Every structure is written in structure tokens, then in C-alpha cells.
Amino acid sequence: MNKSPYLNSKEAAAYIKCSEITLRISRCTGILYGKKSPTYRKCGKTIIYESEILNEWLKGFSLISNTSQYKSEAKL
């Protein structure tokens, strides 16, 4: 069975490891984890996210192998 490329808010939040309310707030503020929030579609009252877009958004974060790298990334 093929998994749909579209995720509702609850599924999208789980996918990017945040709470659903955090994702909901990011739709109002435009910011999530200090970056521009991922785009979404609104179909009537339903909000959907494309898994491709969420994957691209996640790629905007640096890969960190240890905490000393994280501290230097935070200074940028």
C-alpha cells in the first residue's frame, strides 16, 4: 500500500518532531525553530503538508555530530 505524500497537521507535526500546537502557531508567525516555517495547503478547513516540502525544510538544518559543533553553529 502506498503512503500518501500528503500529511494532516498532526501527522506533519509528528514527522518533523514537534507538537501540533507548535506547528499551528508557526502558520501564524511564519517561523518554526528559528527558520521560515514549511509551506502548506489549505483545502477548505483542512490543512495539509506535502512530505517533499517537509523533507526540504528539514534539510535547512545542519547535520551535527557533537555538541561542540552545535555551539559553533549557534554563533553564526
Image (tube, rainbow, N blue to C red):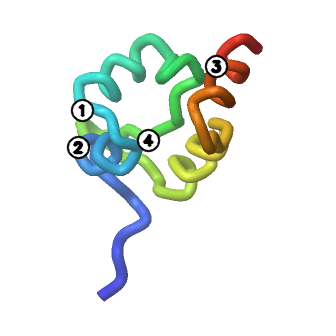
The residue lying at 56 percent from left, 49 percent from top is: 53
Indicate which disc, 2 or 1, sits on the residue closer to the N terminus.
2
In front of the other: label 4 or label 1? 1
Please tell me whether residue 59 is drawn above or below residue 28 in the rendered image: below
Mark 2 or mark 4, which is nearer to you?
2
User: Which residue position is annotated with label 2?
Assistant: 10
Q: Earlier in the sequence, mark 2 or mark 4?
A: 2
Q: Which residue is found at the position 24% from the left and 36% from the top?
A: 45
* Residue at mark 2 to residue at mark 1: CA–CA distance: 6 Å
Task: Tell me the quarter of the image containing the N terminus.
Answer: bottom left
- Asked whether the residues under the numbered discs 2 and 1 touch, taking CB atoms below 8 Å apart as contact, a structural biologist would say yes
The residue singled out by tag 1 in the image is 20
Q: Is residue 46 left or right of residue 76?
A: left
Q: Which of pointers 3 and 4 lies earlier in the amino acid sequence?
A: 4
Circles 2 and 4 in contact, beta carbons < 8 Å: no
Disc 2 and disc 4: Cα gap in Å? 14 Å
Name the amino acid type tagged 3. Lys
The amino acid type of the residue labelled 2 equals Lys
Question: In the displayed structure, does residue 17 sit left or right of residue 30?
Answer: left
Query: Against 8, is 26 above or below?
Result: above
Determine the CA span between mark 3 and mark 2.
31 Å
